[in-house]
Image (spheres, helix red, strand yellow):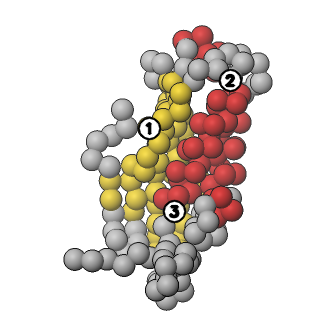
Amino acid sequence: MSKSLTHIDAEGSARMVDVGAKAATRRVAVASGRITMSASALEAIRAGNAPKGDVLGTARIAGIMAAKKTADLIPMCHPLTLDAVNLDFTFEDSAVLAVGTASLSGKTGVEMEAITAVSVALLTIYDMAKALDKGMVIGDIRLIEKRGGKSGDWRFETSPR
């Protein structure tokens, strides 16, 4: 079964999908990612002793701001009026796990906004802590859940490691 590409027109040119006829529904997306680092960098972040200040507080604000700017960064994304964006951080043995949730009532999903929030939050952690560990590694960025919309609910089969 052949499925047409939604962002390509009949001539093969890129296009933004027309969502005008779609009904507005409640939509939620959850994404996650992590940044691994040295024990000393992790402890400084946990203790609030990083040279640039409150790493996770700054990362939370950066991630929220980024989610609101997703359409400026990803060419075919629709500008969305988000109802909420939340970022939570969990300390792991050698990493910080970021989980971002974006939600709205609208005509298109918020997966890209949740993924962008997590990505920029992790980049901000790197920037805020690079004086402590330049070898930090950002990875495992993924959508872990989406709810609502025409395609319904979806969840990543295994939880973030």
| Nearer-N-terminus badge (2/1) | 2
What residue did someone put label 1 on? 140
Looking at the rendered structure, the kind of residue marked 1 is Asp
Where 73 falls versus 117 (above or below)?
A: below
Measure the alpha-carbon separation of dots 2 and 1.
19 Å
Q: Nearer the viewer, mark 2 or mark 3?
A: 2
Measure the alpha-carbon separation of dots 1 and 3.
19 Å
Looking at the rendered structure, the kind of residue marked 3 is Val
Give residue 110's mark. Answer: 3
Residue at the image point whose x is 68% and y is 23% from the top: 129
Q: Is residue 19 visible?
A: no
User: SS class of the residue under badge 1?
Assistant: strand
Residue 35 spot, x, y in % from top left: 53, 29
Mark 2 Cα within 10 Å, few/some/many (few <14, many 20+)? many
Looking at the rendered structure, the kind of residue marked 2 is Ala
Left or right position of 122 against 142: right
Q: Is residue 7 visible?
A: yes
What residue did someone put label 2 on? 129
Q: Quadrant of the C terminus?
A: top left
Where 54 falls versus 14 (above or below)?
A: above
Where 91 falls versus 23 (above or below)?
A: above
